Amino acid sequence: MRILSLSHRLQHRQVDNHTILNAPNIADYDAIVLDIRATADIIHQAAQGEGFLFTHGDAPIVNGEGSDGAAPLAALLDRRREEFARALERGAVVAVILAPQSRITGVTEKQGLDRYFMLPAPIGMAWDGTTIRASEGSRGAVVDHAHPFVKVYETYQSQLLYRATIDDRAPGIGQHAHVFLRSAGGSAIGVDVRVGAGRIVFLPSPSNPETEWLPPLEGQAMVDAFSDALALPDDDPPYWGREMPVPGLEAQETRVRELAFAVEQAQDEHAMAERIATSLSRVRQVLWAGSESALLAAAAACAQTIGFEIARSEDGEPVWLDGDHSVDVVVASSEGVVEMSPHYRLRQRIEAGIASRAIAPRGVIVVSGQRLSRPDERSREIADSLRVASEAVGYALLPSRVLYRCALAALEGAPQERLEAMRARIASTNGIVDLDDLLK
């Protein structure tokens, strides 16, 4: 866990100290600290042009239109408001050091800003002067000792100087807020408010947050509080922690690693089995597939089963390869007779091959006529005109039921020489492919 602390210096190896201006993306953090008064001060400095201020990406910040790589202050503040909203939507916890409500002036195009402008509020609530009241005091009391952020308060309890309170009777706040700290007079100075999936935890301020002794103590307390609030495991044991013996722990950890490896191996085997099952299921889909893409995938699965290599031409068209031989592939299906449409598509590809390479490529049309009838009940799948065209032009017509039988033969262990003969006949036939002698 990393904590982003904005204008509130904390000393801990898990804390990234920044300002609202030079911080990385706030939504990247689940744990955020925001000092409202100090953040308003740095925004005011940027608005007045005091000093040289830069974004996290080293872009100079200007109070006006951005140019020459400069970042406009108004746009940067809009982005921060969006980042806070996204962080809370993701379940982040934002610890806010309370300060009185006040206006922020001087930001070009942002004349209506107040100190709490970047924090979203629950529906029916607003972080305005009726909810956040100016008030000062140095005496507080814990009313919920189980709250994770009590430990933060306890680091500076003796140096408390709260500067604002929250009216827990303000409109809408009762259903969203939980008070865990009150002043001596009963005002709410520590309040946990649900905002979306996240939480905003308001904390009272110490009298001097820059005191040398405070940042290390408060830093560790913040880490512990956020860990509890986010229900994170304690994953940072001391260096000697693993030396402490626990009977049976080492054997159980070994068992966990073995089971994790077995699960990973089983997942790999499951993925492989699923791929094989999908490929095999396509073998029978070749008999009824209706769309061109489905029939093409099913025909490819069958062709691959009998030894063809499935590829694409330079033009992206499907081809089947057998050694040095290449066959252009077209598929066509119909609930009735397959007519001449696939002929024109394949002839166009054959003519393109002749024009570009001065050779006549071989071609095959996988035909699935009467596709919704049982294979043994199909009486007329191919139109006579398509058969004559295939014989005249010189390409193969491969009925889907024949290709299916070829795939079955391969899966049942047909010898390689028979599969080679099937591939050779498919690649060389002019007209309807007859493989009955090889499928006996």
Image (spheres, helix red, strand yellow):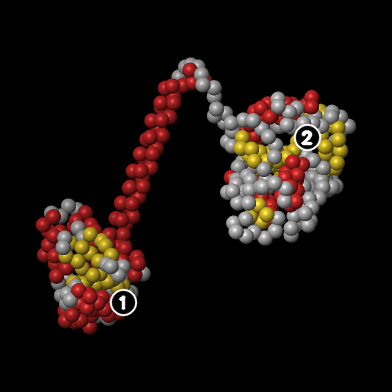
Q: Which sits earlier in the primary sequence, circle 2 or circle 1?
A: 2
Q: Give left or right: position of 406 versus 34.
A: left
Q: Residue 336 got which mark?
A: 1
Q: Tag on residue 294?
A: none
Q: Quadrant of residue 268?
A: top left
Rendering coords of residue 154 (x, y %): 74, 26
Which residue corresponds to mark 2?
A: 204
Q: Amino acid at mark 2?
A: Pro
Say left or right for 374 vs 360: right
Position of residue 186 in the picture relative to residue 75 (left or right): right
Q: Measure the C-alpha gap from mark 2 to mark 1.
A: 81 Å
Question: Toward the viewer: 15 or 178?
Answer: 15
> Based on the displayed image, in which of its 4 quarters is residue 267 positioned?
top left
Disc 1, SS: loop
Q: Secondary structure at mark 2?
A: loop
| Marker count (numbered) | 2
Residue nearer the viewer, 10 or 71: 71
Type of amino acid under label 1: Gly
Q: Residue at x 60, y 59 (%)?
A: 68
